[in-house]
Image: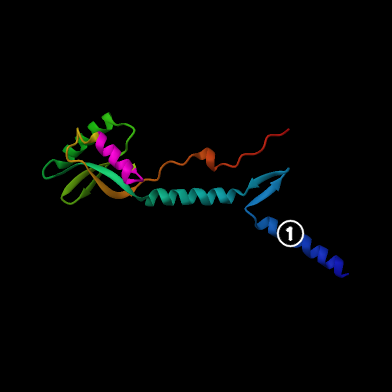
């Protein structure tokens, strides 16, 4: 009787543990629970909104009449010259500031500053909240083994 009770208890606890796991076996393949993907996507959205601490290069600042218009012009010129580098206009009263790049390290920001300093003489490195670098989706996926 005790053996039957222990075997039933073991089977039930194993089933309960399998249901609580984020992964399950299906046809000898490890399958991830879809809720894990939903949680990861929600966390990515939160992180994109908040950003991370990093560096940008401030290439232009202006105040006064028509400063917004002049800052927009400099941004358009920069975007045409460096289409692969993101640029951001911010307003910190009374200044419009044009900051470029999302650099995780000061060394990356210095390299870019050296590249743009002949054109933008007043360019400086500033600490700022930057956008997260894009994630490689392929590295995040679980791949299934091939059928032999």
As helix, strand or loop, the secondary structure at mark 1 comes to: helix
**Which residue reaches farthest top?**
80
- 139 left or right of 144? left
Instruction: Indicate whether residue 117 is drawn in magenta.
Output: no
Looking at this view, is 4 or 115 the one in front?
115
Residue positioned 29% across, 44% down in the render:
56
- What residue is rendered at 28% in x and 50% in y? 127
Say which quarter of the image contains residue 140: top right
Mark 1 is surrounded, within 10 Å at the Cα level, by few (under 14), some (14 to 19) or many (20 or more) other residues, namely: few
The quarter of the picture where the C terminus appears is top right
> Is 111 in the magenta?
yes
Q: Is residue 101 visible?
A: no
Numbered label tally: 1
Q: Residue at x 73, y 62 (%)?
A: 13
- Residue 67 location, x and y as percent? 15, 42
**Residue that sits furthest to the right in the current view:** 1
- Residue 11 x/y as whole percent: 78, 60
Q: Main secondary structure of the magenta part?
A: helix
Q: For residue 14, which quarter of the picture?
A: bottom right
Q: Which residues are magenta?
A: 103-115
| Residue assigned mark 1 | 14
- Locate the N terminus by quadrant: bottom right
Q: Residue furthest bottom?
A: 2
Residue 93 image position (x, y, % from top left): 17, 52
What residue is at 22 percent from the left and 48 percent from the top?
91
- Measured as percent of width and height from the top left, residue 135 is found at 46, 42
């Amino acid at each position: 009787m005790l053996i039957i009770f222990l075997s039933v208890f073991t089977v039930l606890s194993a089933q309960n543990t399998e249901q609580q796991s984020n992964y399950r076996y299906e046809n000898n393949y490890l399958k991830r629970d879809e809720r894990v993907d939903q949680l990861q996507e929600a966390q990515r959205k939160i992180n994109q909104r908040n950003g991370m601490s990093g560096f940008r290069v401030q290439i232009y600042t202006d105040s006064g009449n028509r400063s917004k218009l002049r800052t927009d012009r400099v941004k358009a010129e920069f975007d045409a010259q460096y289409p692969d580098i993101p640029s951001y206009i911010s307003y910190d009263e009374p200044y419009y500031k044009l900051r470029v790049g999302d650099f995780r390290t000061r060394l990356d920001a210095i390299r870019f500053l050296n590249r743009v300093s002949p054109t933008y003489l007043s360019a400086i490195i500033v600490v700022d909240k930057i956008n997260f670098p894009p994630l490689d989706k392929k590295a995040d996926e679980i791949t299934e083994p091939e059928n032999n």
